[in-house]
Image (cartoon, rainbow, N blue to C red):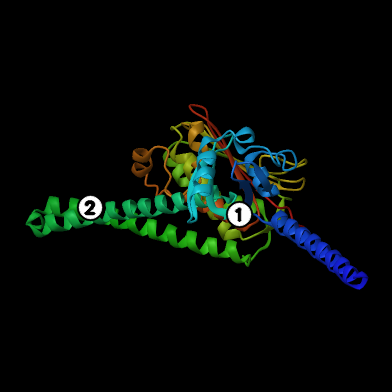
Amino acid sequence: MADAIGVLREQLVERGLTIGRQGTQQEAVLGSMIEGVLAIDARQRIVSINRAAADLLGLDPHAVIRRPLQEVVRNPDLRRFALRAIDCREPVEDDLVLRGLRDRTIRLQGTALRDLSGDGGAMIVLNDVTTIHHFEKVRRDFVANVSHELKTPVASIKGFVETLLDGAAEDPADNERFLKIIAKQADRLASIIDDLLALSRIEQSEGTGNLPLEMVRIAEVFTAVVADCMPRAADRSIELDVACDESIQTAVNAPLLEQAVINLVDNAIKYSDPGKSVWLSASVAATGTAELACEAGCVLIVVRDEGCGIEEEHLPRLFERFYRVDKARSRKLGGTGLGLSIVKHIVQAHGGTIAVQSQPGVGSTFTIALPLES
């Protein structure tokens, strides 16, 4: 009997150690998970919650154990989902929105739990899919926008060609006028396709990090920008004021940076009234800039205008593809809706950031921050 009790004691000790190791491993796994995991019993009391779930719900993971879910979570949709997860034999799934300073979309997956005593409960997995939903919306908007942008000039070209085939080609005046319209729409179609291809190439360089860079003086970039933009500025009687220290230089891809700055200056010229000014400047940041995520030693390129300005509600989406503040005016001025998106991706491919400040009726300021390398 003594030997049997000794063996039993050893087995109990070993089982206790095994259970302890399993508990430690379980805590480590749950703690390292990106997904939130919440376990409740049949009375909706919280049995277990990992750090990810506590952060999503704004809870203290130690203070809520054994407390009713309805007491610590104010979201009625989550409480209803918990009841459904406990009652359903099959796994259930749903989405809910957590309101706050920034609304978040949470994907819920619930599975009923049954132990040997017959008591119930549920395991709920929470995934923050806010970013996924945002990118899905951006993708849908992009497909819809690019379809619309391509369809408009194609429909115009087709319509005028059919008109010419129906007999308008016999009238020299109509013939020339319609051909000019067709040529203009063809140029617009080519511009959209060129911008899409350029954006694709830039994104590929941004993703692989193999953008070829060389030490370039920013003043040389500005010289090329002025040579390209000055004729259009002169046509609109707009003064282009440039300020750049000759000593400022950093590692950039000169043609791409020129394209980015030209896009910004060209927009400033388009959206400014005749007689106004556009300022282009470069400097080295002496202190960090939180808004641009820029540490000391960044090169700041600023394009400022006295144009119509942009409403604050449009600023967060300003760099999206095909996003237009004033759709009618943008198309009238010949824009493809991709210029600012191209600028953003060029800057990001250089490891930099871009920000915009604008006030309606006063003007806009675009600031590019590039890493300073010597």
Taking the view exactly as shown, the residue that stands out farthest to the right is 2
- Seen from the viewer's position, the closer of residues 233 and 287 is 287
In the image, 367 versus 127, the foreground residue is: 127
| Element assignment for label 2 | helix
At label 1, the amino acid type is: Gln
Spot occupied by residue 146 in the image (x, y as percentages of width and height): 37, 54
Quadrant including the N terminus: bottom right
Which residue is located at x 67 percent, y 56 percent? Answer: 33
For mark 1, what is the residue? 348
| Residue mark closest to the camera, 2 vs 1 | 1
Q: Quadrant of the C terminus?
A: bottom right
Viewer-side residue, 85 vs 336: 85
Left or right placement of residue 320 versus residue 145 in this view: right
Q: Residues within 10 Å of mark 2 (few under 14, many from 20)?
A: some
Residue at label 2? 156
State the mark number for residue 282. none
**What's under tag 2, amino acid-wise?**
Ser
